[in-house]
Amino acid sequence: MRRNEKLLRLASVLEICDEHDLTDDCVFMYCSKCVNDLANRSIEAVQRQLDKPEIRSCRIPLVIDFEKMTNPDYWLKSKLFCEALSERSEPLRQKILQLVDMLQMLQMKILQVDAEYAEQVFKRMAARLKKSTNILDYKKWKVQHPHPTMEQLERQQVQLTADMLIAGILEYDEHASGDEIAEVKLELVRRCLRHGQQLPENFIEECAKLKRYSYWKGKHMFMINYHEIYIYLFSHCFEKFTEKQRIVLYEYDVQLRMIHEDMMKLKPELKDLEKQTPRTEASEQELFRFIHPKIGDEEGLLIQEEVVRLVRRYGVQMICEYLQRMAREEKILLPPNPSTAYAELVRLGMPTGEGYSEKHFRNHYLRK
């Protein structure tokens, strides 16, 4: 059995067990043995991942549904653990709880993506695609528009970005919140697109996702924060992409750079802007109140950006677990009052809607 597919098989066997009369001793013993063996192999497989100094594969999340599999009830809902059989199945129950704890540790480890390695992966991919792609659409457009105006280049920038989103490049990212969607100025986007172009129903949400990884240089150049986008692609979905999507991703990057080069030819002053480090939203906010006192302002800003990404992309359970880990690493100093922490995280962008209530947050905050 490959990789962590043992976990999928374990879940499948528990479902099969539910189809049988587990009050029969022979059936119970047979099912228990199958589940126990698979649980042992699953624990060994997860432990091998935990023993690695760092996670360098984006395949792991594709065979583990962390949202389900880190919840004990996902496993213990099986009839094998019902009240009537609880005494006999208790050792197996403890083994499943051990597996859940290990999966939670693995989930936290995967969140700490090696950004440099992720960048290397995509640069290698780009080098391969560079040898195999056809003439770029922007090159064809330039033949028809040898002396483009800034307005024409801005429209091409928007059209190129819209086509990339429609191709599903951000399809696997966390769903956008209501606040993120409210920030999208869809009518301004439509004005730059081909007249009459039909947009998919989820287009505004895809635009909201893109805002997480983008910023503006001056009034003209739409920029991608490559550090952020590499982490998203590597962590969540790269192996789910089709070959066509991989080409779209590569060609978007190349053509956006071409557009920026042509913009700088029209306005040389943009070259100075292009060299500047992006000002993130986090850098413009008041510093996170719970940065550890031993941390300086420069490192504190990096920690704040980490917290902002965390609270805007993940659920409450993962947020609380990750904050606890940061506290153990002495990056932050968490307050004992959950309401104080909740208010500060909301200020940094944590949603407050369904699944993010203060009551739900309290249930997970500082849980051991």
Image (cartoon, rainbow, N blue to C red):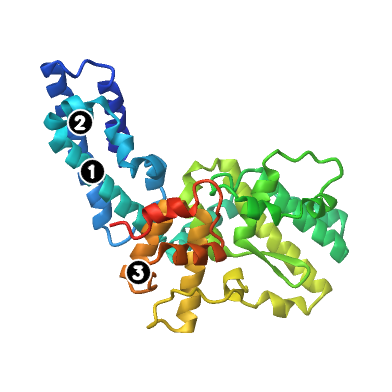
In the image, is 210 to the left or to the right of 29?
right
Q: Is residue 96 above or below residue 82?
A: below
Q: Is residue 347 in view?
A: yes
Can you tell which quarter of the image residue 267 is in?
Answer: bottom right
Give the distance between the C-alpha atoms of the residues marked 2 and 3, in whole angstroms: 36 Å
Front residue (pair 181, 195)? 181
Q: Which residue is mark 3?
A: 327
For the residues carrying marks 1 and 2, which lies nearer the camera in this image? 1
Q: Residue at x 57, y 51 (%)?
A: 129
Mark 3 nearby-residue class (10 Å; few <14, some 14–19, many ≥20): some
Q: Amino acid at mark 3?
A: Ala
Q: Amino acid at mark 1?
A: Leu
Residue 1 pos. (x, y %): 27, 35
Q: Which mark is residue 127?
A: none
Give the distance between the C-alpha atoms of the residues marked 3 and 1, in whole angstroms: 24 Å
Front residue (pair 337, 178)? 337
Q: How many numbered marks are there? A: 3
Q: Is residue 97 above or below residue 299?
A: above
Q: Is residue 89 above or below residue 318?
A: above
Q: Quadrant of the C terminus?
A: bottom left
Q: Which mark is residue 35?
A: 2
Mark 2 nearby-residue class (10 Å; few <14, some 14–19, many ≥20): many
Q: Residue at x 45, y 52 (%)?
A: 359
Q: Which residue is mark 1?
A: 97
Q: Amino acid at mark 2?
A: Val
Q: Secondary structure at mark 2?
A: helix
Q: Residue at x 14, y 28 (%)?
A: 33
